[in-house]
Amino acid sequence: MHVLKFGGTSVANSTNIKLITDIFLQHPAAQKIVVVSAFSGITDQLIACGQLAEAGDERYAEVIKGIEKRHLDTTRELLPVSNQSACLSVVKQLCNELETICEGVFSLQELSSRSKDRIVSFGELLSSKIISGYLQAIGHAHTWLDSRQLIKTDSQFGNAAVVFAVTNENIRQSIAQSQDALFIAPGFIASNEHNLTTTLGRGGSDYTAAIYAAALQAEALEIWTDVSGMMTADPRWVSNAKPLPAISYQEAMELSHFGAKVIYPPTIQPAMQMKIPVWIKNSFAAQDHGTVIQHETNSDNGFIRGISSISNISLISLEGSGMIGIPGFSKRLFQALANEKINVILITQGSSEHSICVGIHAADIQRASAAVNAAFEIEIAGKKVEPVAVESDLSIVALVGDQMKSHPGISGQMFSALGRNGINVRAIAQGSSEKNISAVIAARDVKKAVNVLHESFFEEVQKQLNLFVVGVGNVGRRLLDQLQQQQAFLAEQLRMQVRVVGVANSRQMYFDDKGVDLSNWKHLLEENGEAQTPDTLVQAIVSRNLRNSVFVDITASDVVAGMYEPLLRKSIAVVACNKIAAASALNHYKKLKSLAREFNTSFLFETNVGAGLPVIGTLNDLVKSGDVIHKIEAVLSGTLNFVFNNYDGSRPFAAVVRQAQEEGYTEPDPRLDLGGTDVMRKILILSREAGYALEMDDITNNGFLPASCYEGSVDNFYSEMEKHEAHFAGLLQGAQANGCKLKFVASFEHGKASVGLRHIAPESDFYHLYGKDNIVLYYTQRYPEQPLVVKGAGAGADVTASGVFADIMRVIH
């Protein structure tokens, strides 16, 4: 004997009914019971009928007409005209009964649980009678079983408990008395000892099938639905969710309890008691393997089976010093909830006994808090216990697997993954059997949490990074080009999916949560972008709540730098090409670094100093490994190095500077470079990263530009340089007279820093520095005489973009 259950979508219309009929008629089992649900959506419509009638709303009759029409139409589509009469008559008769019951509810304006069960029972009665009529029309012998007569329950209408001793005997006798090999039965419905219709709870058709299977000790129970088995997570939320070929009964119960909708939780128990394998199969892809739920599974398939969640959760917390060491508090709390028939989903209590916290459905929160406050009224009045604290808008996310107990570190990995993505855990529950670890989190974070955990436990093959790129000038464009070029390499070699999900310039922003088309980003931003302000940009990023989010600032804007703090507070990593934040007031710099640590994210700015050179990274490695920085000497401006390497007196100084700007080596305002401000910021950042507390005002700037060059616009700046060509020629001639070159050098020693133009002799490390190259010399405790040297191109859009790219990679590694 095999029992096959087909859900609402599987019997939604005549086409689907023919499809599932082929499935069970071609099934190799000698004997089969087919349990069917109501047509999809019908149960909700039947509930609406009762509610409208109770409210005195005559529209209930229109809903009944719609239900009747759908079933009559399906019958006509399914059956040949010559065989329709009897089946149409049954449909009409059942719909007339439904209308009569609803008329009574309408007259009394009262919908009891008993009446509601009677109303909703018509869905399964109609669908099973139509399928039975179809089998009769095609000449296939079978018996229609009235589940109400076979499955006996108590009188808890709406969610009745089965009386198994009577039920099992009824089923066995009924099957034994029939000569047929095929049986059709309505799911969900049963009756009490007085033959009054009861129901087994929403999703109860699965349970009905399990009851039949257990009573007959079937070889297998098959649940046919619209998905190909149970998945590692909800595929509507997690695009990379994977099918589970096999799981244990306990794992299936845990997953279904924590929100997996594929199977109704009580279904497992009867099958587990009789050790009947339960298959989850897809009616629309019958060839797919599906999932088998059985006594034991192969641990080679992984020790974490799945991730599930429950929404609409509230927490109630009872706490107070009067609870410590006093027995009976927990009993009274749960008794108060039990008296109100409130189901407790999650429990957590500290070993200090100072507080106890339970998770319940949000719909029950008012009754729960009132009941508990009433139960502890005396203690609350005496200040021994605080009034119940309520937290709402929560969800539970659960990690499930039988083998977790034999693998240390699962909890740590789970909470670390959540923490890295700014998901705060409000409560935790883990049984000693370690079949699941549950965490209560904000409802707004549940989709993100499921994705984060799925990535952590199931997607070691590929990690996902979501980038928001602000600033699409020379460097920004090169970065986007590099990201596009490297996508395939990152996926294949590093198992990383790096997606740009947002781009913005100073006026507009454009987002695509599935990934911006990097071959067309400019058009998308210009044509489909929306106006942005700092607040709207931050809000748009935060509201997306995407895992592994990185904000990439490739601007020189203080406004954009002002966005870092709110983003870091949401655990969104910041990669900054922009120097303003790291070179801001010391307290602000420290605060940003502190926020990154506090919210378990990254604040990276390697390109602030040496473009693509590993200047800060090398310094950080020295400090982390215990070295002490005594002195730093550096040529840190690729711009100034380019300028002085190319200024030989044959062309005006202003022309060389203009060339540097046109080739992308300068800031938008070249005075930041030539005036020394940019270099001051860089040596300030290095000294801070070396562990010294410096402000910008502490740095001495021995500038070389005439004062008038700082006045007016950038155009005025070029005009003034042309007027002072003799000044620049004199600087060059003075150096040449001493056999030296001009270099703009930054230095830090004994806690003091300075920048300025120097004459560099041929024996210096700085002398043979060509083009736009930078060089940094670290004199440390380990490198006292011969410094550690970092040298290479220190300016240019490509190398700067590559430095930003490298910081992005550091975020996830």
Image (spheres, rainbow, N blue to C red):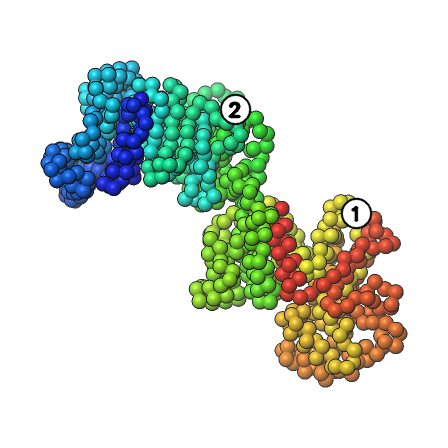
| Three-letter code for the amino acid on which mark 2 is drawn | Ser
Question: In the visual, does 438 lie left or right of 676?
Answer: left
For the N terminus, give its image quadrant. top left
Q: Which residue is mark 2?
A: 432
264, 342: nearer the viewer:
264
Q: In this orientation, does residue 526 appear?
A: yes
Residue drawn at the location 70% of the way across and 79% of the way down: 655
Residue 64 placement: quadrant = top left
Up the image or down, 23 lies above or below 519; here it is above
- Return the mark for residue 627: 1
Q: In this orientation, does residue 359 appear?
A: no
Up the image or down, 406 lies above or below 623; here it is above
Question: In the visual, does 91 lie left or right of 748?
Answer: left
Q: Looking at the picture, how far across and down is residue 363, in whole percent? A: 35, 37
Residue drawn at the location 38% of the way across and 32% of the way down: 280
Label 1 Cα neighbours within 10 Å, binned few <14 / some 14-19 / many ≥20: some
Q: CA distance from mark 1 to mark 2?
A: 46 Å
| Three-letter code for the amino acid on which mark 1 is drawn | Asp
Q: Looking at the picture, how far across and down is residue 176, in whole percent? A: 24, 16
Up the image or down, 544 lies above or below 735; here it is above
Question: In the visual, does 12 lie left or right of 95?
Answer: right
Q: Looking at the picture, how far across and down is residue 213, in whole percent? A: 32, 22
Label 2 Cα neighbours within 10 Å, binned few <14 / some 14-19 / many ≥20: few
242, 60: nearer the viewer:
242
Q: Looking at the picture, how far across and down is residue 316, in whole percent? A: 43, 34
Question: In the visual, does 436 lie left or right of 583?
Answer: left
Residue drawn at the location 76% of the way across and 49% of the way down: 622
Is there a contact, CB below 8 Å, between mark 1 and mark 2? no
SS class, disc 1: loop
Q: How many marks?
A: 2
SS class, disc 2: loop
Mark 1 / mark 2, whichever is N-terminal: 2
